[in-house]
Amino acid sequence: MAGILAWFWNERFWLPHNVTWADLKNTDEATFPQAEDLYVACPLAFCIFMIRLVFERFIARPCALGLKIQANGPQKAQPNAILEKVFTAITKHPDEKRLEGLSKQLDWDVRTIQRWFRQRRNQEKPSTLTTWLWNTRECWYNYPYQPLTVDIHYYYILELSFYLSLLFSQFTDIRRKDFLIMFLHHLATITLITFSYVNNMARVGTLVMCLHDAADVLMEVAKMANYAKCQRLCNLLFVMFAMVFISSRLGVYPVWILNTTLFESWEIVGPYPSWWVFNLLLILLQFLHSFWSYLIVKIACRAISRGKVSKDDRSDIESSSDEDNGPPPIQKHYNSTTNGTNKAHGTNGYLSAGAPCPDEH
């Protein structure tokens, strides 16, 4: 084990050629980041998680109910053992051929079966209240805590604790469509925070984290306003978020941070193996910033055309032109006329007789 650790923490990979781990030990004259400083992050992450649960239960939820945010989830689909078996074991999105077979087997209209599958898919999605609480949580985690800490060591520990708590929350909360992407994002962030701290790159790491925290909180508050049906506030917050995001991540980040880590550090300490790794990751982050900025501009253009900012599509309920809150579907005998109509119009686009619906998310 000692040999593996010695190989992993090889000085020639992690440090400049004229620096050793012994040079980064604390002395009376100087204090350096130490790996053991991060041990406290795990219990602190658990405390943050528990505080968040108390906050949601006694503060966020009453506020949401006071804003009349819908607490009930989508209408449940009518119980049906055959359709339930298809849904759980075969497919959640049956094609036209399977729909026709189920229609004959159950003596139901094809559109009625489509509606059942749509309601069943929506049934697994969270209510608006749950999504609103999720955004309060994200706002809680993304709040820029740097003004509360003087020492960057404490700030690093606090940020690592929050990301550990976020990672843990993914397995205790409702599963969302971007679960895997966010899991990898949180895992990569925790890895970067840990190794940049141990490698004495805490200052540039602090700048990167502060830069990201500044915009994220505005996005979460904007989504909260959207679910609370405060559309003007949502639009205003989204504009603020877009301005802060684009200016900080396409302006400050490359001009100030990347310029320092790529060019100024080259002149001061020169390149070494871990220097290349960290800078390649920072450059990759810049490409992600550019892609996300493109998505933000795209959302803004779509919002201008529609007159409002859309909801978070990770948890939206599939909609249809006929209300899902209406009475249970009426069983209809399958016949060639119905089949011909479905083939002509496309079964995925119609849920009730002659009524079109938007494309599914």
Image (cartoon, rainbow, N blue to C red):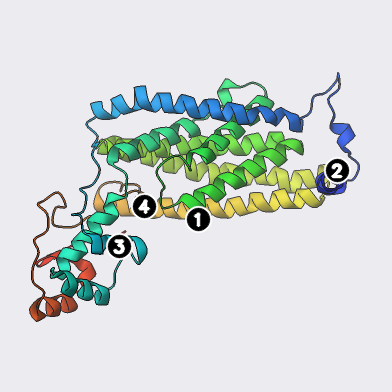
Q: Which residue is mark 3?
A: 85
Q: Amino acid at mark 3?
A: Lys
Residue at image coords 81%, 47%: 8
Q: Within 10 Å of the Cα at label 1, are there few (<14), some (14-19), or many (20+) other Cα atoms? A: few
Q: Which residue is mark 2?
A: 2
Q: CA distance from mark 3 to mark 1?
A: 40 Å
Question: Which tag, 4 or 1, sits closer to the chain's start?
Answer: 1
- Residue at the farthest front position: 81
Q: Amino acid at mark 1?
A: Phe
Count up the numbered dots: 4
Question: Which tag, 1 or 2, sits closer to the chain's start?
Answer: 2
Mark in the foreground, 1 or 2:
2
- Residue at the farthest right position: 18
Question: Which tag, 3 or 2, sits closer to the chain's start?
Answer: 2
Question: Which tag, 3 or 1, sits closer to the chain's start?
Answer: 3
Q: Amino acid at mark 2?
A: Ala
Q: Where, by quadrant of the figure, is residue 159 drawn? A: top right
Q: Within 10 Å of the Cα at label 4, are there few (<14), some (14-19), or many (20+) other Cα atoms? A: some
Q: Which residue is mark 1?
A: 291
